[in-house]
Image: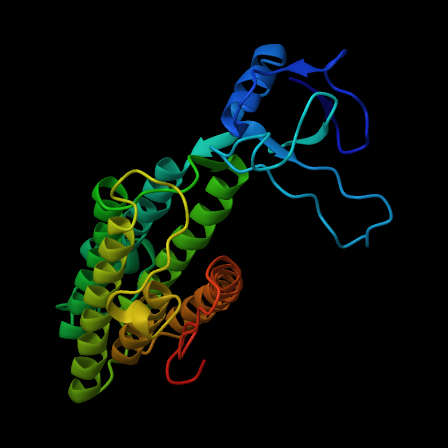
Amino acid sequence: MKLKILSRSGRELVSGGLEVKDGATTDDLKAAFAAKKPKYPPSRQRFTLPVPEGADKKVRGVALDAGKSLSKDYGLQTGSKVCFKDLGPQVPYAVVFLAEYAGPLACYLPFYFLRKEIYGDAMGLPGADAPMLLVQTLAMLFHSGHYLKRILETLFVHHFSHATMPIANLFKNCTYYWCFAAIMSYFINHPQYTPVGHSQMVAGFAISALMQLGNLHSHVYQSSLRADGSKTYKEPKGGLFRYVTCANYTCEIYNWVGFNIATQSVWGWVFALCGSAQMVAWANAKHRRLKKLFPGFSRAFKILPPFY
């Protein structure tokens, strides 16, 4: 079977067409294209069907999913056209996750363990040699514990549906996590930091601890759905997913709500709001995708019970 490979502008990229075996899958197509164009390894490739002529400008070509048969699933045959997009330089998901989660530890901990050197010797602030408050110690333990959990989940729990992501995401994600960790730590561990009342601190950290456990349970459950190595979507029906479309995001958001109730950090609340906005967008997209994939799919909440 010989396919015509077109650029997004309609230019033919492989003169005479690209030969693939009968019964070829999307993975076979990517391998064949990489053999012809070594500059584009499979991780950089994305193939779609052409947009039908006269279609609305908002309509996009159907993406060719990994493992799917080109002929049986997409009706391709000799002479059929497919469109190629270069995704740019890629980096493994695990590398991005490990970098973005290890960085906050390196950015947060110095302000706690080197407080005298940073606030006193370097900045000349009074009180830098005073004992750390209980809330400051607990905040350090909860913040560090959160990211240590994420690192261990990356290594031992998560199954990624995609092997790589654009390398630009590495810098964007690391900037987000690292900078917020540093600025939160700077103010929480500041010698002039004013703690909340004891009851509020205990309540906040209790919420955070419970949500951390809920988040861990959600990730372990999601991983179990792909224990067979499959990368296809499966409807999550267990645990909190019986009631919330994105229970893992629910626990992540409320974890930071609890942390900020306990620490009352302005930059902590800004971090929580920025993360929540992104996760709400992801939750909406996932809810639509699950409704499309599984007719009759419905949950009481998408992400933020009892509000949304």
Q: In this rendering, is residue 150 above or below 245?
A: above
Res 14 seen here: yes
- Residue 109 appears in the rendering: no
Q: Closest to the observer: 62 or 222?
A: 62
Q: Seen in the image, is 193 located left or right of residue 137?
A: right
Q: Residue placed at 52% from the left, 21% from the top? A: 28
Measured as percent of width and height from the top left, residue 107 is found at: 32, 51
Q: How is the image coloured?
A: rainbow
- Total marks placed: 0
**Quarter holding residue 72:** top right
Up-down relation of residue 96 to residue 129 (above or below): above
User: Which residue lies at the image location 30% right of the left edge and 38% below the top edge?
Assistant: 229
Left or right position of 98 against 25: left
Q: Is residue 293 above or below residue 298?
A: above
* Location of residue 110 in the rendering, given as x and y in whole percent from the top left corner: 25, 52
Question: Splitting the image into 4 quarters, where does residue 95 fall?
Answer: top left
Residue in front for this viewpoint, 136 or 95:
95
Q: Position of residue 167 (x, y in %)?
A: 51, 35
Given residues 14 and 74, the one toward you in this image is 74
Horizontal side of residue 44 vs 298, given as left or right = right
**Image quadrant for the C terminus?**
bottom left
Q: Give the left or right position of residue 306, taking residue 118 as reference.
A: right
Quarter of the rendering occupied by the N terminus: top right
Considering depth in this image, is 189 or 25 the residue closer to the camera?
25
Figure quadrant of residue 143: bottom left
* Residue shown at the point (41%, 45%) measured from the top left: 232
Instruction: From the top left corner, tell me how far across and down residue 299 is, in percent.
Output: 40, 75
